[in-house]
Structures are given as C-alpha cells and as structure tokens.
Image: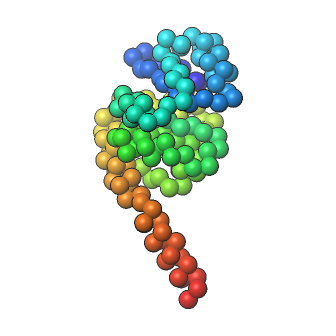
Amino acid sequence: MEAANKVLMKDKNVRFVMAGKGDMLNKMIRRVAQLRISQKFHFTGFLEGDDVDRMFALSDVYVMPSVSEPFGISPLEAMRSNVPVVISKQSGVSEVLNHALKVDFWDVDALADSIYGLIHYPALKKTFLKWGKEEINNLKWENAAEKVLEIYQNATS
C-alpha cells in the first residue's frame, strides 16, 4: 500500500490490483482508504484458472513483496505470461530467479522505484521480459532432477 502510494505520487495514471485473501486483507483495505487511493486500488479476492490468465494479460508489472513466502509460484506464472516481476529478496523464489527485480520486503522506496521503473522505462521492461521468458522456459522439473542426480553422484563417488 505504501509503495503504491509513492508510485501514485509520481504517476496518477496507475492502477493497483491485489489478488488473494488472508488475515491481513481488512487491514490493507483500511490502509488504502486512509491513504485515499481507493479509486486506484482494486481487491479481487482469490483468483484461479482463466481469471489468473486474464489478470496477467491486463498487468504491466507483478509484485510479490512477501515477508516470508516459502517459494511462491505466482511470479513464475507472471513471467510465463510476459509480465515482469518485482519480488522480495526474502522469498524462496528469489533464490531461483535471476531476471526479476528483487527488493527487501521492508524497503518501500526500492519497491516503489522498481514498479515505477518497469512502467516508465521501456528498455528495462523489455530486458526483464526477454531474459525472464528465457529463464522460465529453462525452469523444468527435468533440469532440476538432473542437477539433483549430478550432486548425488558427485557426493557418492
């Protein structure tokens, strides 16, 4: 909410969508109201199936500023859908992805700058889309299994 507010201070022509639900949802809705950005903020609730694909098709940037997401597959889905991602360094998926902008979950300014940059600097967005798509295409269970097998074989020989 805080990062969205900072982005909106620089560019009023941005809309934010929060998909999902959880025990902090009401607190987030109240904070959006306090910041007076509710006309630029939409809460969809939990999305699945075609609704997820439609949301990615409408999105310019995907943001996952999780404090402690063990892995989080949604950034991978966003990248597969040609949407650049901003994730927290503390998320498990940050260990796997190289072509995502990564910020500390608590660094509101870095988060806002990352969102703003991907929206307003086409070369930045293009770079993350190109290399992100390639990275996602190479993330396959077969590749992971081969790496595990290689580590096992090296450890036992």
**Quadrant of residue 67 within the rendered picture:** top right
Q: How many marks?
A: 0
Q: Position of residue 53 (x, y in %)?
A: 39, 35
Quadrant containing the N terminus in the rendered view: top right
**Extreme-front residue of the structure:** 49
| Residue drawn at x 59%, y 24% as measured from the top left | 2
| Residue drawn at x 50%, y 55% as measured from the top left | 96
Tell me if I can see residue 6 in this picture.
Answer: no
Q: Position of residue 72 (x, y in %)?
A: 55, 46
Q: Position of residue 8 (x, y in %)?
A: 47, 19
**Extreme-bottom residue of the structure:** 157
Q: Is residue 141 above or below residue 149?
A: above
Q: Is residue 60 above or below residue 85?
A: above
Colour scheme: rainbow
Quadrant containing the C terminus in the rendered view: bottom right
| Residue drawn at x 56%, y 42% as measured from the top left | 88
Tell me if I can see residue 85 in this picture.
Answer: yes
| Residue drawn at x 65%, y 16% as measured from the top left | 30
